[in-house]
Amino acid sequence: MNKFKEKIKILTCDDIRRILYRLTHQILEKDPDPQKLVLIGIQTRGVYLAKRIQQIIEELEKIKVPLGILDITLYRDDLTTIGHNPIVKETIIGFDLTDKVVVLVDDVLFTGRTVRAALDEIMDFGRPKRVELLVLVDRGYRELPIRADFVGKNIPTSNKELVEVRLKEIDRKDEVILLQEEDRIPKTEDREEAI
Amino acid sequence: MKEWTKQHILGIKDLSRDEIELVLSQAQAFKEISQREVKKVPALRGKTVLNLFFENSTRTRTSFELAAKRLSADVINFSSSTSSLSKGESAVDTVKTLNAYHPDIMVVRSVSSACLYDFDKYTQASIVNAGDGQNEHPTQALLDMFTVKEIKGTLEGLNVLIVGDIRHSRVARSNIFAFHKFSSQTTVCAPPTFIPYEFDKLGGVEVSYDLDEVIGKADVIIMLRIQQERQNSSFFPTIREYVDKFALTGARLAKIKKDCIVLHPGPVNWDVEISSAIKDKVHPLILKQVENGLAIRMACLYLVGTNKR
């Protein structure tokens, strides 16, 4: 792993809170019938973001939309070539996806490969009416034709940079940091961590 | 998080405590896949798993086969009774021949003990031991541990009682190694002829010849299968005597700890190892073991199958 140093704080705790409220309003604006709505968070930080959105929807609409947890490891396109076993985490989708509007939640949208894997996995659980993508940060550099429906913040980055989303639930505080690589050009294996 | 580095899974003896915990945690994640609408993930797509069974087995083979299929691998089954082995080809030649198909994983059950340690000379594939003679049966021990952990929440500080044909049992050996790594105390209980004399000297293993004496302190009881074909040999006088002294009966079940669990690697000889009168009480968990076995084998195939060398 190459060394990265903190370059700039992109989002503060308050920014993240406001963004999540805005994104939730956008979801509800687009899909006014929350009965059909389900949230699926991509492990790990997408899950916490989805949980927060679930709470905001409950606060605004007095309805608790179902929340699923998705681990995309087994659907990665680089699984047999990366040279080490990525740890498989829990997937819990305890409801039927048929005819539901799925809002897929992740922290950073980068190459789009994670989302491709997530879409494939979701289809193995059923046939949703529609799948929408929500991300806290879109940093560009797509390698697949994928775009987000709800974006917290667009951040133009260079490929020597890394966007790190930190959330209270696991990182003790809420913030989004842009990291700058210290010396070398990232090798392929470093970038996989971020897909 | 720890990383998996092993190319093969040959025995519990070779695995560290961390590695065992990793398999168990991965199996937990894999268990969910079997409850999906589409019970398949693309993790081992394009990989070939060869089930090479030099000794007959239906359950273990089926479990490995299904595990591989749920991971999208291609599976070839090769068993001694239907293959060229019955035409006199040697085991090594068979491995060499099958290696020509470039399998990624060979799941091997063999008649002779510990012979798998040599097999990597003849193949590039990862080797997973599905039971080798009287040596080890690592996936069975792993699924036993998984089941124990699922119910007990821990693998540490337990009193594990293994009853039955210890001498011929690779399941017993693997479980003894496994529980020892988690500082659990293992007691083996059987007629003296079923207990190898070295076991007295083995650290961490207690030997008992009286089931009634030790049954009350066990947290986990593993009943082993009595191979009926051995009943005419000199290992024990009659089945009736064995049942009288070592079978799990209603009366003995009444003596066990309230939270003690009873496992059996299957298939059970009802009224030999376990009385059929208590079938309702013990069978559900034994069937649960079968379900957990699938998750464990998926985890093992995933770990060796995606470990690039």
Image: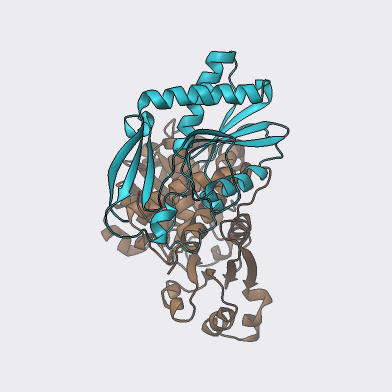
Chain colours: A cyan, B brown
Image location of residue B2, percent across then percent down: 35, 52
Q: From the viewer's perspective, is residue B291 above or below residue B47?
A: above
Q: From the viewer's perspective, is residue B203 above or below residue B281?
A: below
> Which residue is more in the foreground, A6 or B100?
A6
**Residue plotted at (44% across, 76% down):** B120
Image location of residue B4, percent across then percent down: 39, 58
For residue B97, say whether it is visible: yes
> Which residue is more in the foreground, A11 or A193?
A11
Q: Is residue A130 left or right of residue B298?
A: right
Image location of residue A51, percent across then percent down: 49, 27
Q: From the viewer's perspective, is residue B232 above or below residue B30?
A: below
Image location of residue B104, percent across then percent down: 53, 70
**Residue plotted at (33% across, 34% down):** A171
Residue B278 lies in quadrant: top right
For residue B254, say whether it is visible: no
Residue B69 lies in quadrant: bottom right
> Which residue is more in the foreground, B193 or A75?
A75
Residue A192 lies in quadrant: bottom left
Number of marks drawn: 0
Quadrant of the image for the C terminus of chain B?
Answer: bottom left
> Which residue is more in the foreground, A138 or A164?
A138
